Image (cartoon, helix red, strand yellow):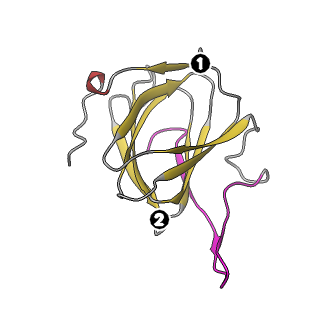
Amino acid sequence: MFTGVSITPLKRIYHEKGDIYHAMKSSEETFSSFGEAYFSTINFSDVKGWKKHQKMIMNIIVPIGSIKFVLYDDRPHSITRGEYFETVICKSNYVRLTVPPGVWMAFQGITSETNLLLNIANVEHDPNEAVSVPLDKIPYNWKS
């Protein structure tokens, strides 16, 4: 795994009238600060990305559906420079993916139903803070 990237198992509490899904607590080690939280959906087999934030720490949770996340490290002094990291987050793998600034991320909807992610970010959205490139600029086989 890349430096600064972490996967935190999250608690899902069964309740007969509907389950409770934990997301993040301010007492957790991966909590930095709170800037904003937003939801995003991704359609089946569609891919969003590549995007790299300069300041934002992303804390990604998938409460509904299944989403494949691919990270690419091109940080100049990183020991994992040039490497990829993949993970699928879903109900059966209910975790939080923490992505530090400077790491490229793209993601793909895996299920044909709703695929919903929550990002709990340490800073508010600023369009000048992130860099986006077309999918073909960072080689990756999204068909596999």
Single out the mark in the foreground, 1 or 2. 1
Q: Is residue 75 left or right of residue 13?
A: left
- The majority secondary structure of the magenta stretch comes to loop
Toward the right, the furthest residue is 27
First reached walking from the N terminus: tag 1 or tag 2: 2
Q: Which of 32/94 is in front? A: 94
Q: Looking at the picture, does residue 82 appear above or below residue 61?
A: above
User: Which residue is outermost to the top?
Assistant: 128
Which residue is the site of mark 1? Answer: 127
Q: Could you tell me residue 4's position as x and y percent?
A: 55, 39
Q: Is residue 50 magenta?
A: no
Q: Which residue is mark 2?
A: 93
From the top left corner, tell me how far across and down residue 53 is, in percent: 55, 25
The quadrant the N terminus occupies is top left
10 Å crowding of disc 2: few (<14), some (14-19), many (20+):
few
Q: CA distance from mark 1 to mark 2?
A: 31 Å
Residue 3, position as x, y percentages in the image = 50, 38
> Do the residues under discs 1 and 2 have CB atoms within 8 angstroms?
no
- How many labels sit on residues? 2
Question: In percent of the image, x 65 and y 85: which residue is there?
Answer: 16
Residue 28 position, x and y percent, is: 73, 53
* Label 2 secondary element: loop
CA neighbours of label 1 inside 10 A, class few (<14), some (14 to 19), many (20+)? few
For this view, does 47 lie left or right of residue 11? Answer: left
Part of the protein shown in magenta: 1-25
Q: Residue lying farthest bottom? A: 16
Which amino acid type is marked by label 1? Pro
Q: What's the residue type where badge 2 is placed?
A: Asn
